[in-house]
Amino acid sequence: MSILLREPDAEAHVARVCFETRPPRFVAVKLGWRVHDPRRAGRAPEPHQVSAALAPSDHWPVHGHLANQPDGILTISSQPFFRLDDCIRHTAADLALLRRKFAAAGLSLIDGTHPPSVQPTASRRGAVPRQAAGEHRASPHSEAAVQVFLDAGTGDDGPASLRRRWQVAHAIGPVLVAAFANSPMNRGRPSGWRSTRFALLHRLDRQPIPVPDAEEDPRAAWARRVLDATVRLPGMPGLTFRDWIRHRTPRPPTLADLDRHLATVTAPIRPRGHLEIGLADAQPDDCWVVPLAVTTALLEDAAASDAALAATERLSRDRPWTRAARFGLTDPELAAAALECFAAAEAALSRMGVTASVHEAVTDFIEHYVARRRCPADELLTPAPVAACSGCRGS
């Protein structure tokens, strides 16, 4: 006879599997790109074209893992590395080889300036575009983005603690969404959002993203959020997982059901044992280096974390994530906080001893975007009369 899953047991399981407490050591990155065939007038290439371009060879794959998503997104995930520089160097090498293989097949990779394929809306400007029935739903794994993976932290109360890193990640979140927004178009027209990807993914027209309580244990808070999330598994009538446990309909849930449910719960910062930080849209050229470097510096360097918390504590609690996705750095509060956060990250990267090219990429991004209260999305909406951000190219 199977044992019924109880709420305390479910919450304990979520807390245990989603947060692995240990001293922070590793960094990894996942990049999402759209595959483009210039011969098909904007349509996605045929699956067999992509498969042929990705055929194994003596030198492929090298350092990371490739996944070809059914919605035209190709993702490349790095291995975990001890050093930020190593993560960047090996990922850049894989990406360069990937681009060469696609070029030989007549294909290319494009960044987040080409937003998800969604139905345009006839509602007010700035509303999240709605999807047609049966159309693919956006997920953290399917959209063109830069995801950063860092260890969750220790179980104590020190500067490397889980509680501290969770607090810092959420504090800087709206700032980084605003600074790295790069999907302002929907089917060739401005959507009203600097980051259509982020707005669609997190349904910002329906509900604000919760602001964590700094005094609450992140493990308990996340476990509660998971159980209170609507179950999106086949055959379920739209109950929350907590309701499913209580009512046991259409059948009692199992631990395997809970694990499947976990994979469907979206959040800007998701605990998956480590922290999965999905704040940045895909960036132009090789500027993916910048969100990776800035996010890592602000969480790994204690002085930078302190500076970031001080810079963001003045942000209004009135839907900061929504303002970030809609207005980018044209929001005065977010722009001021971004200047301080990026300056703190730049100083931290110097202390971390990163290569000159990485430091130059961050400095160039600050000068071209952050100092001008602009984000990459603004290049499409109102191009600046200056050269494009050059420090990211070839990093």
Image: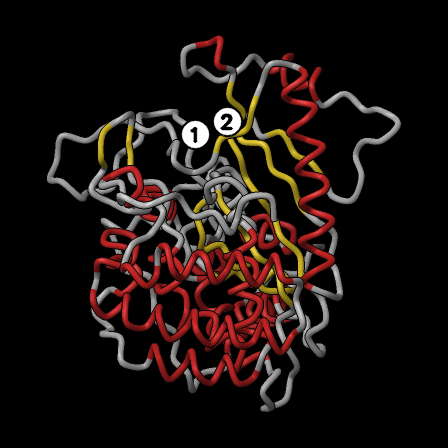
Q: With respect to residue 106, does 145 lie above or below?
A: below
Q: Where is residue 350 in the image (x, y as percent from the top left)?
A: 60, 74
Report whether 318 appears left or right of 25: left
Q: With respect to residue 1, does 222 lie above or below?
A: below
- SS of the residue at dot 1? loop
The earlier-in-sequence mark between 1 and 2 is 2
Name the quarter where the N terminus is drawn: bottom right
- SS of the residue at dot 2? loop
CA gap, disc 1 and disc 2:
7 Å
Q: With respect to residue 288, does 15 lie above or below?
A: below
* Residue at the limit of the structure toward the left, as seen here: 124
Q: Name the residue under label 2.
A: 71
> Who's the residue at 60% across and 70% down the image?
9
Task: Check if mark 1's residue and mark 2's residue have beta carbons within 8 Å.
Answer: yes
Q: How many numbered marks appear?
A: 2
Q: Mark 1 points at which residue?
A: 136
Along the line of sight, the residue nearer the viewer: 170 or 260: 170
The amino acid type found where label 2 is placed reads Asp
Q: How crowded is mark 1: few (under 14 residues within 10 Å), some or many (20 or more)?
A: some
> Who's the residue at 34% across and 61% down the image?
370
